[in-house]
Amino acid sequence: MDAVHDAFGEEIDRDVVVRASEYPGGYRSDRHCHGRAQLVYACAGVVKVTADTGSWVVPQHRGVWIPAKTEHQI
C-alpha cells in the first residue's frame, strides 16, 4: 500500500509548525509521510514509530525526529 501524503501545515510560511494530537490506546495510523520534517513527542504513554529504516519506541517525555518525506506509521 502506498503512503498517504499528510500535507498539514505545508501552506504555512513558517520554519516550524506545531500540531498536537491525542491517540487512544492501541491506535495505529496508516502509512503516511509529510513534506516537512516531524518531531513525534510522547507527552504521556508510549508511541511506536515504524519506517523502512527501523522502529523506535518513544517513551513519555521523549521524542523521535522523522525527516521530511519519510514514509512511516505511528
Image: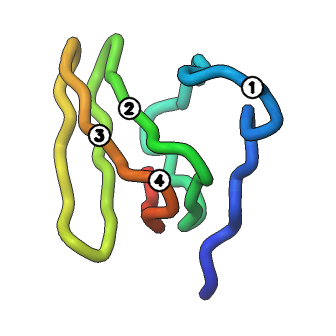
Question: Disc 1 or 3, which lies upstream in sequence?
Answer: 1
Q: What amino acid is at disc 3?
A: Trp
Residue at 17% across / 43% down in the picture? 57
- Rounded to the nearest whole Å, what is the CA distance between mark 1 and mark 4? 16 Å
Q: Secondary structure at mark 1?
A: loop
Frontmost of labels 4 and 3 is 4
Above or below for 23 versus 60: below
The mark found on residue 68 in the picture is 4
Q: Is residue 12 rendered to the left or right of residue 36?
A: right
Residue holding disc 3:
65
Q: Few, some or many C-alpha atoms within 10 Å of disc 3 (few <14, some 14-19, many ≥20)?
A: few
Residue holding disc 2:
39
Above or below for 53 versus 43: below
Q: Secondary structure at mark 3?
A: strand
Residue at 51% across / 62% down in the picture? 69
Q: Secondary structure at mark 4?
A: loop
- Of residue 65 and residue 13, the one placed in the foreground of this image is 13
